[in-house]
Each structure stands twice: as C-alpha cells, then as structure tokens.
Image (cartoon, rainbow, N blue to C red):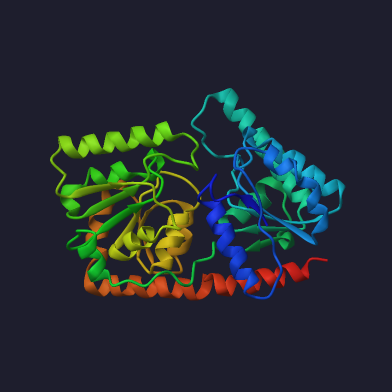
Amino acid sequence: MISPTRESEKAISGYSFTLTNSIRNTKQDIIDFTYEAGNAKTLFKKMSELKEYDIVHIQHEYNLLGGYGLPFFKLYRYLYRNNIKTITTMHTVLSQNENFKSGMIKTILRKILYKIQNKLILKVSDEIILHANFFKEILINEYGAKNEKITIFPQGIIDKIPEYSKEKLKKELGLKGPVYLFMGSMVPDHGHDIIIKQAKEIGKTILVVANPGSVNDRNSNRTRDYLKQNQEYVEKNGLSEIVRFDVSDINDRNPLWWKYFIASDLVLLPYRGGIGSGIFAHAMAARIPVIASNIKFFNEISKKFNCVKVASEESEYKDIIKNSMKKQNYSKMKKGCENYIKEFGLSVLGKKYKELYLSIK
C-alpha cells in the first residue's frame, strides 16, 4: 500500500494505515510502503523495491507527491514498464467542469494536467477504487473509464474507538448543554465562519477544535489567518460565551481527538466545496450525527442514511441544527450512524479488499 507517512500528512495516511490493519486482520499479507508527502524523491529512491510485490495499491490524491502532480507520471510509467499489477484508490476525481480559483491560463494548464494524469492512471491500473458514485460518473463520462474496471468502496469507518461517558467528558472538558463541533483543518473552504455568523441564533456551544497550523495544506499561514479572522469576529461581536476555540496540536492518534467527538452532539461540516470528508468518517466512528453542506458527497449519503442532514442554503443551518436536536429526530440520526457503520465499517471492508486483491490476475 503506497501512502504518505503519518508525520508528513494526516488525512490519507491515517485512512491508509487503519485500512491496512483491517486487511491484515483477514490474514492477508500487506505492507505499508510510505514516503514523505510533497517529496517525491523519498518514494523514487526505493521504487525498484515495488517489483517484489504481487500487487501495488496506490492511495492517490493529485498533489500528494508535490510538483503539481507531475511525479505521479514517473511512478505510473515505472509500474507500466515493469508490468506490475496496480490498484489505485482515487480520493479525488476532478471534473473538467470544475471551477478553479485561479487565472484562465492556470485553469487551462491544470485541466490538461488532470486529464493526462487521469488517462494514465486508467491505462496502468488494473482496478480503480472510488469512494462515491459521482466520481465514477466523472471518470466514465469525461475520461473514458470502463465501468467494469471501477469498484466503489466508501471510505471505511473505524469500528472501535476508545469508550467514554459523554456526561463525564463534558464535565472534564468544561462543556454544558448541546455541543456543536468543528474538528480538523481550519481553512475558508470548511466554512467555520458561516456557522459562527449564525451563532446567536444557534446557541451554546459551538466548539472549534483546530491545530495552530496545517500539515496537509502545507500552507500554515492560510490556516493561521483564517483562525485569527474568526477569533476576532467572535470577540468583536460578543460571542465568546457561545463560540469556544480549543487550539492545540491534535490528531486522531491523540485520545483527546476522540474525547471531543464523543462529547459533542452534532459535528458541523458546512463545506463551501470539496468532494469528501475524513472528518465525516470520524464522526461516524464516534456515532455522532452530522450537519453538512449541499455538496455531492453529503447529498449521496443523505439519500440512503439518516446520519447526515444537508443544508441547501447557508441560512438554513440554524434551523436544521435546532430541528436535528429534537429528541425524535436526533434518535433517528443516531440510528443512521449505526446503520452506516454496519455497512461500511473497516472490518467489513477489509474482507472486501482481500477479495478484490485475490481477484486480480
């Protein structure tokens, strides 16, 4: 399994390592083959070792290797020339209709780059794994992928996390009443400000748990600036009794990470864009319902499971949060979380991955 080290990247690496552990539990041999995110040389210097394996499974995100994604061309060319059986999990499939926040020339170049890279991945990979059906539609309709070459495995959910008493955790963390949690990278696209501007109508406690910088974004200044903007807004508008910021180095290997999830009543994901969410997977692991934005990822899930409620407009969050906290509605959402885990827990997916590996000839 080719993925970044935990020290260099927090999202895909964490997912990859929990996945390989679940696959090992099925008695399937699998090795974590890691590199430093953004530093392709750390992968290339040991790339010849890939010949030793029956199957190479790549966790792919366009810029994980840095260099605008160009190093992936060298990796896939090597796999193709050496006739190495390859599976690629594409965490993102960017459409040619995507609206990029860049100038016209940069946008054109990016779309050309993604098109060529996607075509190469499709040519070299024996199997493509996607986390959502709308990615499949993009690959088939825009890049000419074959339906039989694609498998949909939603992002696996950790089956077992530390067990705590919600009441005791709230006391330990100094929390009272309903808790609405933001967790993870603090960047404008994650929409913290959308909720904070409705704080008076939502009520206590909007809890923002964030790192002071960002490893994944590899642009900590953007994270610090956005954090500062929101903190200043809260102070200026007298919202300190409603909105609380807990800023420290925190990740999913830290017990405090899970304490925050379990102490919360709802997890808030008002994303302005994007195509997925690792925080959603952690919320499901903790059995905490989610209030999310109107993007394809959340819409697809909400059609089948009650674990997430989607706001069509930004102004709807306050009403959806209040409605979700009503006893009967909240009970249905909690049940939806349990149903989601039963279907997509890692212990279940681990067996499916083993079956897929054994089917590759």
Q: Position of residue 99 (x, y in %)?
A: 51, 36
Residue 304's place in the image compared with 229, above or below, is below
Taking 279 as reference, is 45 left or right? right
Residue furthest out toward the right:
82
Residue 236's place in the image compared with 289, above or below, is above
Q: Position of residue 180 (x, y in %)?
A: 27, 57
Q: How many numbered discs?
A: 0
Q: Position of residue 84 (x, y in %)?
A: 82, 54
Camera-nearest residue between 320 and 160: 160
For residue 319, which quarter of the picture? bottom left
For residue 205, which quarter of the picture? bottom left
**Residue 131 is at least partly visible in this image:** no
Q: Residue at x 77, y 60 (%)?
A: 55
Taking 144 as reference, is 206 left or right? left
Q: Residue at x 78, y 52 (%)?
A: 50
Q: Residue at x 67, y 33 (%)?
A: 112
Where is the N terminus found, in terms of image quarters? bottom right
Q: Position of residue 37 (x, y in %)?
A: 59, 42
Q: Residue at x 32, y 38 (%)?
A: 227
Camera-nearest residue between 252 and 60: 252
Taking 124 as reference, is 151 left or right? left
**Residue 334 is at least partly visible in this image:** yes
Where is the C terminus found, in terms of image quarters? bottom right
For residue 289, which quarter of the picture? bottom left
